[in-house]
Each structure stands twice: as C-alpha cells, then as structure tokens.
Amino acid sequence: MGDEAATVRQTRVSETLVCLPTLDEGQTIGPLIDAILALPIAADVLVIDDGSTDGTRLAVETRARRDPRVGLIWRPRRLGLGSAHRLAWLHARRLGYRRIVTMDADMSHDPADIPRLLALLDAGADVAIGSRFAPGGRLDYRGVRRLLSRGGNHLAGAMLRLGLTEHTTSLRAARLDRVPAGLVESIDQNGYAFFLAQARRFVRHGLTVAEAPIHFRDRQAGRSKLPPTAIFQGLATLVSLARLGDLPEPFAPLDEGGGHCALCRSDYGAPAGDAFRCLACFSPLPG
Ligand SMILES: Nc1nc2c(ncn2[C@@H]2O[C@H](COP(=O)(O)OP(=O)(O)O)[C@@H](O)[C@H]2O)c(=O)[nH]1
Ligand SMILES: [Mg+2]
C-alpha cells in the first residue's frame, strides 16, 4: 500500500475500544498505551495517526506487533481532529465494540480516569464526559489558556443549556448501542467545534449524559497541535448551534454496509456535508 492510502490494522479482543488521535506524540503515546493496557479493565487501544514524523507510528506499530489489543489507523497527512474521532467511532462500530472511549494522547487526560467513566456507563449513563469544571475537577492551564478554556465553557453552558459543565475536551465514553449510528460520524467539524457539536447532539437526541470530575494536566512534551483559529471556529459553531434552540440537529444515518473506498480499500465511507467521504484517506466517494 502506498503513502496515499491509509493503513488499518486491528482485531477486536475486548468489548471496549480506547481511541487516541495523534499528531507527533512520540514521547507520550508509548507510555500512554502501556498505562491503558495495564488498567484493571479489559480494553483495546486504537491510535489514529495523521502522518506523524516523530516516531509515533513506530512506537504504536512495535506494540501492535506484539499485542493484538493494539491497533493503528495511519493516515498519510493531517486530516483534522474531528475527522480522526469520527473515524474512531466508525471503526468501533464496524468491529462490533460495545463501548468507545476517546481521549487526547499527550497525557493531559489521565488513563486512570477511564474506569471511572466506564463505571458511569455501567450505572446507566449512555455517555460519560470527563469534566475539568465539575465540582472536584481541575485544570492546570495558566493565564490566557485557562481563561479561554473556562470562559469558553461558561459561554457554551449559557448558550447551549445542555446541563453540562464541560463541552470542549475529548475525554468521553459512550455505549455504542445507545448512540444512533451516524450521530457522531456525521459531525463535519474539527477541533473544539467538534466536541461542542458532539456534546449537543448527545443531549438533544435524548441520551443520558453523566459527567465525572477530572484533573486535566498541561502537556509536558511536544506542543499544542490545535491552531488559534480552532478557537474562532469553536465560537462560530457555538453561535450556529445556539440558533437551533432545543431542536435536535438532523443527521445522516450511516449506511450499515459502509462506503467502500477503492483507493485505500477500507470501509470507512461516511456522510460529509452533502457528499460522502472516506474517513480513512479522505477521498470523495460516490453518494
Ligand atoms: N489524528 C489527529 N490527531 C490530532 C490532530 N490535531 C490534534 N490531534 C491530537 O489531538 C489531541 C489533542 O490535541 P492538542 O494539541 O493536545 O490540543 P490542546 O490540548 O487543545 O492543545 C492530541 O493527542 C493531538 O496529537 C489531527 O489533525 N489529527
Ligand atoms: Mg493537549
């Protein structure tokens, strides 16, 4: 397979898939995978890497070769954080997982929080969100980043009225049988906008969403991959979502057969705006 195609490698071992999108996270991805696999819960790990050049791919492939619980979807170039999450959801459904967990790969999210989120699903929630702003939660950012995170989430709380304290971070767990197929896979947004839209869809489509307080640490290695424009895109998305009021956003249900992509030979076709795209290599597909 050439560099223009995605490589996809994973078999399902357990019922829970923990998904980690990466863009040059070579210093943290190995220890993070090891920490997740050492948790007192059964989980597989999927990394969705967008053409990292810093050894991320090698660190994942080394582990994937010796442990069937570890999988990798490698895309040849940066295709966006939201698109990586949508692909993770689609993949989890295709392989028949019962639960999905998503989180950042820079160690800002603590793998030890995963069992706490899964416990909320076991207690009856459809979705569990790790929150920096719920009572007991912590955020290590200082200065402008802290202000933007806090302010953005206050604003989202006031404008969307979802009953949540956290709208913009990726640490989330869900029962795949309770979330309609396509609800997440059709969110055509990246960055913070994706997480805002996802939180709103969960609540407005009637799912039971629980929050668990988390301690969010600042990254110790590498640098932030989200450009400042992601903040403005998030704000614009917030305004357009608020305009919908309490109405659930319509979404395109997934075709269970899955759009087959002739270019990368995966089955990752999903609705994108008015068209269909392969989420693995991003080529347009016939609708
Ligand atoms: N696959 C993929 N991962 C991404 C992309 N953008 C960011 N990430 C990953 O998403 C996670 C969150 O990004 P990060 O830079 O830490 O955002 P911040 O915490 O808001 O500064 C990290 O694991 C990144 O490596 C992308 O375009 N594609
Ligand atoms: Mg980060």
Image (tube, grey):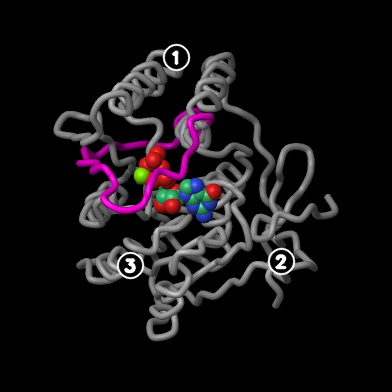
Question: From the Cβ of disc 2, is ligand 1 less than 8 Å away?
Answer: no
Mark 2 crowd level (few <14, some 14–19, many ≥20, 10 Å Cα)? few
User: From this viewpoint, is residue 126 visible?
Assistant: no
Name which residue lies at 59% across and 71% down: 8
Q: Disc 2 or disc 3, which is closer to the eye?
A: 2
**Residue holding disc 2:** 4
**Residue holding disc 1:** 159
Depicted 213 relative to depicted 65: above or below: above
Mark 1 crowd level (few <14, some 14–19, many ≥20, 10 Å Cα)? some
Earlier along the polypeptide chain: callout 2 or callout 1? 2
Depicted 212 relative to depicted 29: above or below: above
Q: Disc 3 or disc 1, which is closer to the eye?
A: 3
From the top left corner, tell me how far across and down residue 145 is, in percent.
32, 28
Name which residue lies at 30% across and 63% down: 32
**Residue holding disc 3:** 33
Earlier along the polypeptide chain: callout 2 or callout 3? 2
Viewer-side residue, 78 vs 82 = 78
Q: Is residue 196 left or right of residue 108?
A: right
Residue closest to the far right: 286
Helix, strand or loop status at disc 2 = loop
Amino acid type of the residue tagged 2 in the rendering: Glu
Amino acid type of the residue tagged 3 in the rendering: Ile
Depicted 68 relative to depicted 152: above or below: below
Find ligand 2 in the image and state its quadrant. Answer: top left
Viewer-side residue, 180 vs 68 = 68
From the top left corner, tell me how far across and down residue 49 is, in percent.
51, 61
The N terminus sits in image quarter = bottom right
Asked if the magenta segment contains residue 215, the reply would be yes
Residues drawn in magenta: 201-229
